[in-house]
Image: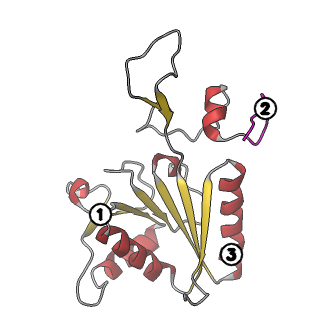
Amino acid sequence: MILRKGAINQPLTHRFLMGKWNGYARPSRPHPFICSKGRDESRPYDNCEMDSMTKVDFYTGSEDKLRTACQLSHKAMQNGVRVVLSAPDKAVDALDKLLWQFPATAFIPHCRSDAAEAGEMPVVLDSGNERFPHHDLLISLHDECVPFFSRFERVIEIVSNDAEDSRLGRERFKFYRDRGYELSHTDLSKPRT
């Protein structure tokens, strides 16, 4: 990919280097390069590799967004990935109850992000607090992109069958696409073969 100086649709990492950062910084990753050797001031980016951008996955066609969030959290937990489930206040209360019953023969250990044991839990519930014990996976149930999404290695956006929720999901998809994030899409309404 050839990048022109001043091009609008350049990836975020290039805009950062050009001094055109868009405000979605990663506080846990203060610099977009990880250097493997000592730094030479005359060639600051030699022996460095780019830090990967946040990957965004869209799961559309969900009949029950809360249950889908629980299923994805359970799958992530089984694979050793820690999860932050971010949702509006009402949904966080419903998720808290559902996680105690999901799956039917067990439960998913979880707590709220402001709890003392949050750093030890595989799943953390959040309703807008921007202090997180880890930055592995964010599952967002919000209608808009949350301002802290880029702190995470991966983001999952869940979109239901509802017409209004689908419209809002398309707006979020466009937001990420326009900023150069790597996107993937899974349609839950289609049967898997």
Q: The disc labelled 3 sits on which kind of residue? A: Ser
Residue at mark 3: 166
Q: Are marks 2 and 1 in contact (CB under 8 Å)?
A: no
Q: Secondary structure at mark 2?
A: loop
**Which dot marks residue 4?**
2
Q: Earlier in the sequence, mark 3 or mark 2?
A: 2
Q: Amino acid at mark 2?
A: Arg
Magenta region includes residue 134: no
Amino acid carrying mark 1 in the image: Gly
Q: Is 7 one of the magenta-colored residues? A: yes
Q: Residue 156, image x and y in percent?
A: 51, 65
Mark earlier in primary sequence (1, 3) = 1
Magenta part of the protein: which range? Answer: 1-9
**Relative depth, front residue between 144 and 79:** 79
Q: CA distance from mark 2 to mark 1?
A: 40 Å
- Distance from disc 3 to disc 2, alpha carbons, whole Å, reads 34 Å
The local secondary structure at tag 3 comes to helix
Give the number of the mark in front: 3 or 2: 2
Circle 1 is placed at which residue position? 80
- Disc 2 crowd rating (10 Å Cα; few below 14, some 14-19, many 20+) is few
Name the residue furthest top.
42
Residue 108: quadrant of the picture = bottom left
Q: Quadrant where the C terminus lies?
A: bottom right
